[in-house]
Structures are given as structure tokens and as C-alpha cells.
Amino acid sequence: MEFKAKEIAEILGGTVDGNPEATVVSFARIESGKPGTICFFANPKYEQYVYTCKADIIIVNKSFEPKEPVSATMVRVDDAYAAVASLLDYVTAKKRSYKRYRGCRSRVRWSSKIGKKVYIGDFAYVGKNASVGDYTKVYEHVFIGDGAKVGSHCIIYPGVRIYPGMEIGDNVIIHANAVIGSDGFGFAPLEDGTWKKIEHTGNVIIEDDVEIGANVCVDKSQMGSTVIRKGTKIDNLCQVAHNVEIGRNTVMAAQTGIAGSAKLGEHCIVGGQVGIAGHITLADNTTIAAQSGIMGNIKEEGQTLMGTPAFPLKQFLRSYALFKRAGK
């Protein structure tokens, strides 16, 4: 990549404060910016680096007023954090190639439907009556089972397993070794003390614009569907059990586990290592702090919860202050 400050400002809808001809070839963090790189400044904690950074261009908010001279050219935008995300998207899209490719060691069953300019890597398998949409990339060692549907403009990274009958929307990214559609953890206790497996006959539906992290497991439902709604982002090493429904634009950090038949609302934020009990409902816009345990329904929208069992953040902090005093 090679961009001038004036080109970046045009892409981002910003203005140039400095040399419009300043040129960059790569990105860098503001703490370690070097000549030829572009950085961004959005968090006030990092303001000191704006004045010492050697990068040629820094993306900043329009409202930023430097307290010291800044040697770099600044591109001023409404929201620096969102702007750098847009710029990264733009650069990635420019680099992306949409050429049809089918690895000689891949196997694509004759009854499957493959769209335009689809990449299928070596040792990938596409089953009977499965479909893969236009411009999708199916990397090496991916398994797509019989009757599964993968939409357009998806990226399926190496080692992903998509079981038969699962449905993946458009613009979905699934990272390495994720498993979509494994059996849920369902067993019935018998009188002799053994456990009988409960067969799972449903599927998983992943809607458009979802991103699934590496080594995530999303179990198929006993009946009906496990559903991950549009725009949801799931970090690495999460477990989504059978019959779970996750609302639109919810984000979930690593090592979170959601038990069967739980329903999460829209625009929720779930921290790392959170445990959510089965058969409960979380209201829209719920925020859950890391390592919390959710044991019952959350009915009020917009709450921030913390602790195990979790309760509202202010109450938790008051309780924590009492715990500390009691321990002295």
C-alpha cells in the first residue's frame, strides 16, 4: 500500500492539517510509529506519543487541540477510532484477490453449487447438495457437509468444520478450527445410573456480517435452530450451546460459555470468561464484566453487571468495598 495524506483524507471524509503530500506505506501503533507509517490517536492516555511519534501521518479527532508542536501531518476526522477501522477495511479490500481457484487436492461433490470466483484450497471438502456463494474463500482443510449453505463474500479459514445442513449468511468470517453444528451436550439420566444421548436434529443459522473466532464451537439445536443474528462478533474459544439465540450486533470476548436455550438480546457486550446459565433471557444492551456468572433472567435493558452471581455494577463495587474491609 502507498497513500498520500490527501488521499487518506478523501477516503475518510476528513481534512489535512500539515503536508498533503506526506506518503505512508504501512500502519503502526502510535507508541512505535516510524517514518513511512500512519498511526491513529483516539485515547487520551496516549497523547504523549503524539508529540514524540516519528510517523508521517496521524489520524486524530477534529476536536483534538495539541498542547505541543506535532511533527506529523494530521488527518482530522469525526471519529479517529472508526476512521482507522474504515481505512484498514479499505486497504484489505484493495489487496484482496477474487480469482476462481480450486485446489487439485480438494474435493467438491458434483451436486454442490459453487458461485463465481470462489477460492477452494487443497484438501477442502464440499459435500453433496452444499452451496458456496460468490467470491467466498474456502481455505485449506475446510469441511463443508452435505446440504450446508455458505453465503457470498465469506472467508472460511483453514480447519473449519461446518456440519451438514448448517446455514451461513453473507460476509461471514469464520476463523481457524471453529466447529459449526456439533451435537449439543444433551443426555437423559436413566434409572441404572447411565446416561442416554439425546439426538440433535436441528441446525445452526449464522446470519450476515457475523465473525466467529478461532476454536469456537456452536452446537446445533435439538429441534429448530441455534441462531446467531446479524452483525454479532464472537472472540476465540467460546462455547455456544444448543438452541441458543444471540441478538443482533452483540459482541462476546474469549472463553465465554453460553448454556443451552439461553437468549441474548441485541447490542449486548459480554466480557471474557463469562458463564451464562441455560434457559434464561438477557435484555437488549446488557453489558457483562469479565468472569461474571449470569444465573437468572435480566429483564431491565442497559444494565452493566459484574460478579458471580452477577448483579448491577454499582452494587457490586459497594459490596467489594465491604469485602476488602472485612478482610483486614
Image (spheres, rainbow, N blue to C red):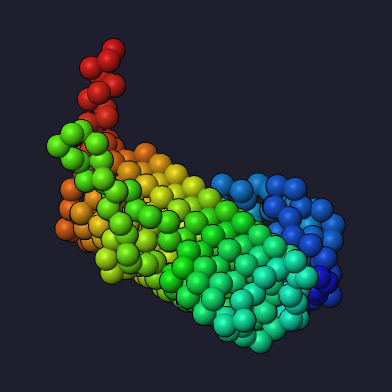
- Can residue 40 be seen here? The reply is no
Q: Can residue 37 be seen in this view?
A: yes
**Nearer the observer, 243 or 111:** 111
Residue under the image location 57 percent in, 81 percent down: 112
List x then y, in percent, for residue 228: 38, 66
- Which residue reaches farthest front? 192
Q: Locate residue 162, reporting x and y percent.
A: 51, 64
- Residue found at the far top of this picture: 328
- Tell me: residue 274, above or below residue 81: above
Position in image of residue 288 (x %, y %): 33, 49
Give the residue furthest to the bottom. Answer: 116
Residue at screen point 24% across, 36% down: 194
Locate the C terminus and report the quarter of the image it occupies: top left
Quarter the N terminus occupies? bottom right
- Residue 246: x %, y % from top left: 34, 63
Position of 106 with respect to 112 (left or right) is right
Q: Quadrant of residue 153?
A: bottom right
